[in-house]
Amino acid sequence: MKRALIASLAFLMFAAVASAQNSTSETQHKTPPTIDQRTTGMQKLPGFFTYFWDAREGKLWLQIDKWNTPFLYYESLPNGVGSNDVGLDRGQPGKTKVVHFERGGPRILLVAENERYRAVTDDLEQRQAVQQAFAQSVLWGFEAAAEDGESVLVDATPFFLSDAHEVAAKLAALKQGNYHVDPSRSAIYLSRTRNFPENTDVESTLTFVGENPGGWVEQVTPDPRAITVHEHFSFIPAPSDGFHERSDDPRSSFFGISYMDFATPVDQPIVKRYIAHFRLAKKDPSAAMSEPVKPIVYYVDRAIPEPIRSAVVEGTAWWDTAFRAAGYNEAFQVKLLPEGVDPMDVRYNVVEWVPRATRGWAYGSAIVDPRTGEIINGHVNLDALRIRQVFLIAQGLLDPFGRDPAALQRANEMALARIRQLDAHETGHTLGLMHNYAGSIVNRSSVMDYPPPTVALGADGALDVSDAYAIGIGEWDKVSIAYGYSDLSQAKNRHWRLTRFSMLHSQEGFCTSRIRTPARSAPPAPSRTFGIPAAMISTA
């Protein structure tokens, strides 16, 4: 009896194992569904990367059909927290990475490439040696849910509901509390999730929950234990060939990219540096003046109220003068942002209005291809309260008790003049330019300075602020744009032409944050030392 029972149990165990093995084998060899089968009933949105919206489940499915092909991944913060102290602003730019998709069985990896170390050569083994020597970063892993040939469908919802902008980390660093994303209070924001041939854009509503909130977030949130913002994800095709890198020069005034090139001959610098600039070329390179092949167009946020909006349009448009001086007609244009256009759409260079609880900074930034320095998009964030600060300064100078209507008008004009200059300054950053802290003391040669107001004393003893801020860009700005944007396709010696522009820069005077000065000291005044300002030869 006992032997029979043991035999029966052994048989049942064998049958169970065999059944499990057969089931596993069938699962492994089961043909995956096609993309059409898996997406039945979903909304299809074709574009750079086609995706499907499952309204019933609230999921976004991404169709991946480009393998080991580099493209740009850019994240940003369209809806912010509203505190200047926290620094998570409306329209805040994020990071740009060169990424690609690769596959290992059912696992799909989004890989960030390491552009800081390269071997620029046709020698495959040299390139592979550098690639293998330095780490890449796998940003996310997906599971294949369906496939058609080389195309794979993945559930990308968890990726798009992740904190790519590192909001939680920033709040923690500022001692505003320990927060994390609550999935039950987060979702794809469909009205600003759009697809185009040139970019795939997804936006998410993310709610961060936490305890012991700091004072800054308490000031700007209905419930500081739940902070809801939006994060935006953009996939952008890698720019096409034909962009001409332009060598950096310490006197050029441009920011840019740098990397180590291990294919460089030993007698040359291994670190390569190139300026950041838009792709711009003349239709007729042989002509002294020519229209561009494609103009640089900036769009002003319709949310900016008048008369501030008109002042912003004027200040932005000042840069057209510099491009004309560089030999272009209509190369730099300014328009109002078309109604319904998302300011985070990377096809539009935007000047965006940023309301905050307290006065804060304006800033200009750019999406730059880390491989070449090509600027893909420029974005200005203009603080909504800055003009009120300038107005109060002007009112304090002219009519502190508000009794003179004429003085009130002059105070308004001074505030608008500052906004024109401020917007031109931040737009200059988006074109690739750094600061020039010597501009104000060298005949107002640059809008890239932080200018103090010029106040004159009239014969009657009254203060005159009619010339508080300069109008238009300066001579230094023109030479800067000539260095970065002149069409040199017909030049016999590009290096000589660029060196000449740099020396012209020196004659105007130049001091920027690249130059180190002793702690707590003022930027050095420009001087003529072999045509180079003293600031440029400082070793402090």
Image: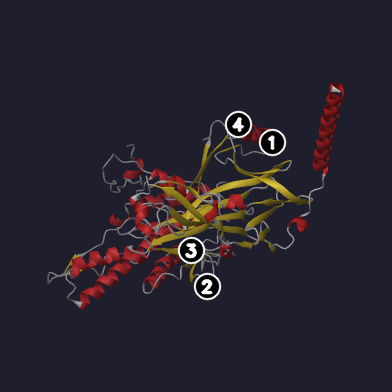
The residue shown at (23%, 74%) is: 408
Amino acid type, mark 3: Val
Q: Position of residue 199 (x, y in %)?
A: 61, 59
Viewer-side label of 1, 3:
3
- Vertical placement of 360 versus 67: above or below? below
N-term-proximal mark, 1 vs 3: 1
N-term-proximal mark, 2 vs 1: 1
The residue singled out by tag 3 in the image is 350
Mark 1 neighbour density, 10 Å: few (under 14) some (14–19) many (20 or more) = few
- In the rendering, which numbered label is found on residue 154? none
Amino acid type, mark 1: Leu
Amino acid type, mark 2: Glu
Viewer-side label of 2, 1:
2
SS at mark 2 in the image = loop
Q: CA distance from mark 1 to mark 3?
A: 41 Å
* Disc 2 to disc 3: CB gap under 8 Å: no
* Disc 4 to disc 1: CB gap under 8 Å: no
The residue singled out by tag 4 in the image is 133
Give the quadrant of residue 345.
Answer: bottom right
Q: Nearer the viewer, residue 57 or 496?
A: 57
The residue singled out by tag 1 in the image is 124
The residue singled out by tag 2 in the image is 339
The residue shown at (30%, 68%) is: 415
Image quarter where the N terminus lies is top right
Q: Position of residue 409 (x, y in %)?
A: 25, 75
N-term-proximal mark, 4 vs 3: 4
